[in-house]
Image: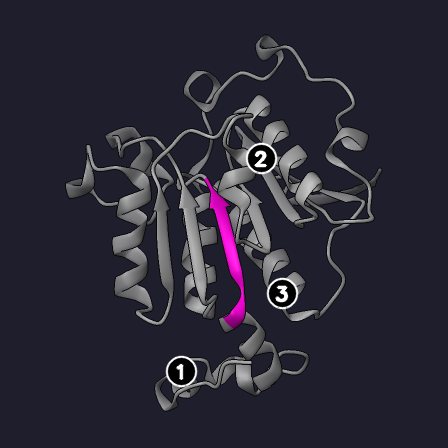
């Protein structure tokens, strides 16, 4: 297990005194290798909190570039970053936030031909993409490789998050049928309130930290739904 440097001990002081994390949990975070799929609305808070928490190796997959309309919710990107690749821009954000994190940018689109290769070397994946087909491809790859997956999604005022872990219910159990694309309109069409991505992305980061440290009870077999209009959470089993 990696020893924390004096700088890291100061940086993570609030974790080190936190029950169920402590020095052992922080060392687990430092040793963790986590892949984040998507550096957009959900990926932004995920990347920020995982980097701040001291995840030792962070990989980010995103083929897209920063656009002005992204900045209403994709908080790791700035106005001057317009046109820059999101994955490489995430690298700059992480380097400024926590230089102890080793970062790998994967500037590519996830599909059935590369999902397994992208997952190689990582022990946890978080998927915040807005395309259902991509989410299914990544979930199936994670299942094949025995890698836990934290999955989040948002639309308009609402969001959801769950965890697929080896031995637990699968993505196919929750979504046995791939819905028609017309039934899942994109944020470009129906919109999304910016803070909704922050709520769900932060919950995704929370689940990741629990999985890495072994603290708490992850959302395995449970779908947590958030209704932003009424400020209510609902939990469904599957």
User: How many labels sit on residues?
Assistant: 3
Which is closer to the viewer, label 3 or label 2? Answer: 3
Q: Which residues are magenta?
A: 31-37
Q: Residues within 10 Å of mark 2 (few under 14, many from 20)?
A: many
Q: Disc 2 designates what residue?
A: 153
Q: At 38% from the left edge and 40% from the top edge, which residue is drawn?
A: 73
Q: Is residue 229 visible?
A: no
**Element at label 3:** helix
Residue 33 lies within the magenta run: yes
- Relative placement, left or right, of 178 versus 23 is right
Q: Is residue 73 visible?
A: yes
Q: At 81% from the left edge and 31% from the top edge, which residue is drawn?
A: 173
Q: Disc 1 designates what residue?
A: 8
- Relative placement, left or right, of 237 versus 66 is right
On screen, residue 231 above or below 172: below
Mark identifier at residue 212: 3
């Amino acid at each position: 297990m990696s020893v924390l440097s004096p700088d890291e001990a100061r940086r993570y002081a609030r974790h080190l005194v936190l029950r169920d994390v402590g020095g052992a949990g922080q060392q687990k975070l430092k040793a963790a290798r986590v892949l984040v799929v998507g550096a957009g609305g959900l990926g932004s808070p995920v990347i920020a909190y995982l980097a701040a928490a001291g995840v030792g190796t962070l990989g980010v997959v995103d083929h897209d570039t920063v656009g002005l309309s992204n900045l209403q919710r994709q908080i790791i990107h700035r106005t001057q970053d317009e046109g820059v690749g999101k994955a490489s821009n995430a690298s700059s954000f992480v380097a400024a936030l926590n230089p102890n994190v080793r970062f790998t940018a994967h500037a590519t689109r996830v599909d059935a031909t590369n999902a397994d290769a992208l997952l190689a070397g990582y022990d946890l994946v978080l998927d915040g993409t807005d395309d259902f087909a991509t989410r299914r491809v990544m979930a199936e790859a994670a299942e094949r490789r025995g890698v836990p997956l934290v999955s989040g999604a948002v639309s308009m005022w609402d969001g959801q998050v769950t965890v697929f872990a080896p031995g637990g219910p699968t993505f196919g159990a929750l979504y046995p049928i791939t819905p028609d694309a017309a039934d899942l309109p994109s944020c470009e069409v129906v919109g999304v309130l910016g803070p909704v991505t922050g709520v769900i992305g932060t919950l995704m980061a929370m689940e990741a930290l629990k999985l890495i440290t072994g603290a708490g009870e992850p959302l395995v077999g449970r779908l947590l739904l958030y209704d932003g209009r009424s400020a209510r959470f609902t939990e469904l089993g599957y």
